[in-house]
C-alpha cells in the first residue's frame, strides 16, 4: 500500500479514536496523540528474513523471573552464545552470569549501571540479538535501541502499551532491516499447537469465532515486594482496559490467520468496577495501610469484542484482580466443530463419540498432535510453563540460524499488543468502536498463513 493510503488509514483510525473519547484516554495516560508522522521506513515487508547466523550472540536485558528462564533455556540450545547481560539489579545480572560460566561459555559482560545502561550494551557489544524481559515500560525503549544499533530485537509480552509505540516498533524494524519479535510463548503450548494443527487440516471447518483471555488471580503477585510487585500494580493505577492481551489472543490470531489473510478491524471494550486490589490490600495490609489508600483505574474484568476484516469475532477477557482459577479459555470455533482448553475438550461434527457432547482432547491426540510438540516438548520438560517457553526459544534460535522468517513477526507484535491501547480508548469512550490499525499496510491480504512448523 502506498504512503497516501497509509496516511489515510491512520487518519481514519484517529477520527474513530476521537469519536471514542480519546481525550479521556489521554487523561488516563495513553499515548494516542493525533500527530501524523511520516513512516520514514523501508516499507512494509512480507516473510522478512535476515542472513543466517551460525552462532547467535545474545545480550539479555532484564533477567528477573522471565528473563532468567530464557537465559537457562538458551544455555541448552545449540548455536547460542550469551555475551552480555544487563539488569538494574546487579545480583540478578550476576546470577545469570554465573549460569553462563557454569555452562562452559566465556564470562558475559555485565551492564548494571542504571535503567538506561542497555543503551551502552546495544551500542558497544557485538551482538546478533537482544532479548528483552524488562517491565512493560521498558519494552519499546530497549527494542528500539537494539534495532537502531543493528541488532535483532525480541521482547516479552506485551510488546508495547500504546498504539504509537506499536507503530514505533514496526517502523524501526522496517527502517533498520531487523527482526522485532514478541515472545508469545502460549502459541507453543500443547493444546494451542494441536488446535492450530486441526485448523490447518480443515477439521474444524472455516474458523468463524474465538474466545480467549488472561484470567489469572495476580493479587499476591501485584502486591509482592519482589519481581512484578515492583512495577505491575502501578499499571493498574494508570490504565483501564486489557493490559495483557497476547497470551490468549496470540494462539487464536494464528488460527484466524491474522495479518496473513485476515486482520483485526475494530474492537469494543468495557470494564467492570475495580474492587479486587483494594479489598485485598485492606484484608492483607490493614485499612490504614499505604496500599489500602492506593487508587486503581483498572476494572477487575475487562471484556473486549474484536471483529476482523472478514467479519469474524473474538471475545477477549482480562481478569487479574479477583480470586479465581487460571484460564486462557482458548476456544476456537469453526463450521465443523470447536476446540477448547481449560478443560481440554473438543467437538467435531461426525466424529464426536456422542452428538452434542464434548470429547476429551486426548481422543484425537494421536492423530493431531503438532509435530513441533512431538519433536521438542520432551527437551523442555521440567522447564518454564510446561515446556512451551523452551519450544519458543528453540524456534527463535533455529529460525535465526537458518535465516528463515520468524513464526511471529513485528506486525503480529504490533497487532496483538495494539489491543492494550485500543481497549483503553474504547473503555474511555464507554464501549465505542475503536479501529485497530493495519500495521501491514495492505500486505495482510497477500501474506501466506503460518504453516505447520516442523522441528
Ligand atoms: N511470557 C510469559 O509467560 C511471561 C511470564 C512472566 C512475565 N512475562 C513478561 O516478562 C517481563 C518481565 O516480567 P518478570 O516476571 O520477569 O518481572 P521481574 O520483575 O521478575 O523481572 C524484570 C527484571 O528487569 C529488571 N529491570 C527493570 N528495569 C530495567 C531496566 N531499565 N534495564 C534493565 N533491567 C531492568 C529488573 O531488575 C528485573 O530483574 C514482563 O514483560 C512480563 O509481562 C512473561
Image (cartoon, rainbow, N blue to C red):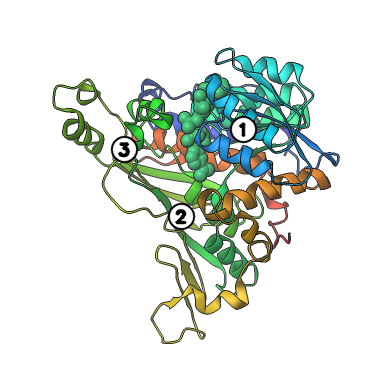
Label 1 CA crowd tier, 10 Å (few <14, some 14–19, many 20+):
few
Residue that extends furthest to the top in the rendered view of this protein = 113
User: For residue 205, which quarter of the picture?
Assistant: bottom right
Which residue shows up at 62% across the image and 77% down it? 367
Residue denoted by label 3: 220
| Distance from mark 3 CB to nearest ligand 1 atom below 8 Å | no
Of 261 and 372, the residue lying toward us: 372
Q: Position of residue 65 (x, y in %)?
A: 50, 36
User: For residue 454, which quarter of the picture?
Assistant: bottom right
Find residue 127 and name its label.
none
Quadrant where the C terminus lies? bottom right
Q: CA distance from mark 2 to mark 1?
A: 26 Å
Residue denoted by label 1: 8
Q: Position of residue 20 (x, y in %)?
A: 39, 33
Which residue shows up at 86% across the image and 39% down it? 51
| Distance from mark 1 CB to nearest ligand 1 atom below 8 Å | no
Q: Position of residue 196 (x, y in %)?
A: 59, 63
Find residue 314 and name its label.
2
Q: Establish if 170 lies above or below 200.
A: above
| Mark nearer the N terminus (1 vs 3) | 1
Q: Establish if 363 lies above or below 130.
A: below
Amino acid at each position: 500500500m502506498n504512503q497516501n493510503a497509509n496516511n489515510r488509514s491512520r487518519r481514519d483510525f484517529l477520527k474513530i479514536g476521537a469519536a471514542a473519547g480519546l481525550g479521556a484516554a489521554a487523561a488516563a495516560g495513553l499515548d494516542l496523540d493525533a500527530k501524523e508522522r511520516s513512516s520514514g521506513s523501508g516499507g512494509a515487508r512480507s516473510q522478512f528474513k535476515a542472513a543466517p547466523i551460525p552462532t547467535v550472540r545474545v545480550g539479555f536485558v532484564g533477567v528477573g523471573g522471565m528473563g532468567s528462564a530464557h537465559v537457562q533455556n538458551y544455555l541448552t540450545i545449540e548455536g547460542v552464545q550469551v555475551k552480555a547481560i544487563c539488569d538494574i539489579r546487579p545480583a540478578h545480572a550476576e546470577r545469570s552470569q554465573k549460569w553462563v560460566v557454569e555452562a562452559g561459555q566465556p564470562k558475559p559482560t555485565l551492564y548494571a549501571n542504571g535503567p538506561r545502561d542497555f543503551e551502552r550494551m546495544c551500542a558497544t557489544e557485538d551482538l546478533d540479538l537482544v532479548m528483552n524481559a524488562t517491565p512493560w515500560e521498558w519494552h519499546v525503549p530497549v527494542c528500539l535501541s537494539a534495532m537502531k544499533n543493528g541488532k535483532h530485537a525480541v521482547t516479552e509480552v506485551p510488546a508495547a502499551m500504546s498504539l504509537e509505540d506499536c507503530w514505533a516498533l514496526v517502523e524501526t524494524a522496517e527502517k533498520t532491516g531487523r527482526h522485532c519479535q514478541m515472545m508469545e510463548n502460549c502459541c507453543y503450548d500443547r493444546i494451542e499447537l494441536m488446535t492450530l494443527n486441526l485448523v490447518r487440516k480443515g477439521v474444524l471447518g472455516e474458523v468463524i469465532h474465538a474466545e480467549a483471555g488472561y484470567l489469572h488471580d495476580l493479587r499476591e503477585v501485584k502486591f509482592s515486594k519482589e519481581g512484578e510487585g515492583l512495577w505491575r500494580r502501578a499499571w493498574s493505577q494508570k490504565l483501564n482496559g486489557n493490559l495483557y492481551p497476547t497470551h490468549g489472543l496470540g494462539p487464536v490470531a494464528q488460527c484466524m490467520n491474522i495479518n496473513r489473510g485476515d486482520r483485526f478491524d475494530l474492537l469494543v471494550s468495557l470494564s467492570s468496577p475495580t474492587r479486587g486490589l483494594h479489598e485485598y490490600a485492606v484484608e492483607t495490609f490493614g485499612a490504614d495501610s499505604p496500599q489500602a489508600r492506593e487508587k486503581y483505574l483498572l476494572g477487575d474484568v475487562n471484556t473486549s469484542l474484536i471483529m476482523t476484516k472478514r467479519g469474524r469475532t473474538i471475545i477477549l477477557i482480562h481478569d487479574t484482580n479477583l480470586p479465581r482459577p487460571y484460564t486462557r479459555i482458548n476456544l476456537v470455533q469453526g463450521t465443523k466443530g470447536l476446540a477448547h482448553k481449560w478443560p481440554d475438550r473438543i467437538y467435531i461434527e461426525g466424529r464426536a463419540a456422542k452428538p452434542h457432547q464434548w470429547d476429551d482432547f486426548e481422543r484425537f491426540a494421536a492423530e493431531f498432535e503438532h509435530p513441533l510438540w512431538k519433536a521438542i516438548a520432551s527437551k523442555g520438560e521440567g522447564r518454564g510453563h510446561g515446556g512451551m517457553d523452551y519450544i519458543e526459544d528453540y524456534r527463535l534460535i533455529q529460525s535465526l540460524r537458518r535465516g528463515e522468517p520468524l513464526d511471529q513477526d513485528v506486525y503480529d507484535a504490533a497487532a496483538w499488543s495494539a489491543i492494550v491501547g485500543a481497549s483503553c480508548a474504547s473503555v474511555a469512550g464507554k464501549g465505542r468502536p475503536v479501529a485497530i490499525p493495519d500495521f501491514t499496510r495492505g500486505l495482510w491480504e497477500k501474506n501466506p498463513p503460518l504453516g505447520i512448523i516442523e522441528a
